[in-house]
Amino acid sequence: MADIQHINRQFGIPGVLSFGEGAGGLPVARVENGFAEAEIALQGAHLLTWQPKGEAPVIWLSPQARFAPGKSVRGGVPVCWPWFGVHASEASYPAHGFARTQMWDVIASSHDDSGTHIVFELRPDNTARGQWPQQYRLQLVVNIGAALSMGLVTHNSGQAAFSIGEALHTYFHVGDIGAVRVTGLEDTDYLDKVRGFDRFHQEGAVQVDSEVDRVYVDTAAECVIHDDHLGRRIHIAKTGSLTTVVWNPWAEKCAEMGDMGENGYRRMLCVESANAHDNVVTLQPGESRTMAVRYWVER
Ligand code: TA6
């Protein structure tokens, strides 16, 4: 990867977008425009913050997050790819794939009346190639505006078909988890990781009063986080994704994890747009697929 000053000269946009050193010395993109402020680490193309003007942060970043080369950051939007969760056959491979801990390149930037656009591309290193020897191009297209849009584009540039699991593992900031409900998943089925991945049926809205780790399958609908404490609704619209994962570790796991901050579980909820388990995606040679999300706040 080129050095950060060089990236700044090439892709910085005066008054709107700059590249520099962030926490732990990790290179970051910083956006401040008329709509919002945001920070994105080049490691993992990991969006760390997004705060629309006049609004409380929408994305949760742990106050105890660790920033180090090759380590995933607790909070923000980890990009899980090319598998979701533990690897199917190799337990020693990193959970949620290698994309979230590799350094990505910046390949384009622009600004218009919808916001600031940045395109990141992953060129895998030898470790990644050893774990997943496929030929591909992977890009994350981000737009920082009054809404936050992200598109994860996978292109199969090889001669053989391959399958991927993927997720935008977004940690949303909530006022208090006890005052939150999620709509949009009613009448769907989920695999419950807390109960040995058994399959259950969701009746009404999702509410969290204990550990929740659910993979909702065959779900394309928009979800809404109703946050009575902050008096707002966060909309989560998506395309190219058939799985929605809802996760909150609750008190005990939160305390064990060590990077969640004290009682951090009360102020976050992951609602992840994904293709996982029943919904892994197969790409034929030459095929491209995009999984995209759009988040916005309503008061
Ligand atoms: O998406 C939910 C989940 O897979 C949970 O099982 C939980 O462990 C979480 O992701 C965080 O995973 P990580 O590898 O970032 O600690």
Image: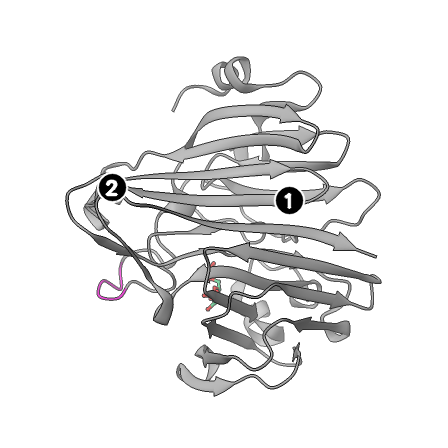
SS category of the residue bearing label 1: strand
Residue 117 image-quadrant placement: top right
Q: Is mark 2 within 8 Å of ligand 1?
A: no
In this rendering, position of residue 108 left or right of residue 260: left
Residue topped by disc 1: 148
Is 227 colored magenta in this rendering? no
Residue topped by disc 2: 286
The reply to whether residue 250 is in sight is yes
Q: Real-space Cα distance between discs 2 and 1?
A: 29 Å
| Numbered range of the magenta stretch | 88-92
At 26% from the left and 64% from the top, the residue drawn is 91
Tell which of 189 and 231 is nearer to you: 189
At 29% from the left and 62% from the top, the residue drawn is 87
Residue 73 pos. (x, y %): 52, 49
Residue 116 pos. (x, y %): 63, 30
Tell which of 66 and 100 is nearer to you: 100
Residue 246 image-quadrant placement: bottom right
Neighbourhood count class around disc 1 (C-alpha, 10 Å): few under 14, some 14–19, many 20 upward: many
Q: Amino acid at mark 2?
A: Gly
Q: Amino acid at mark 1?
A: Leu
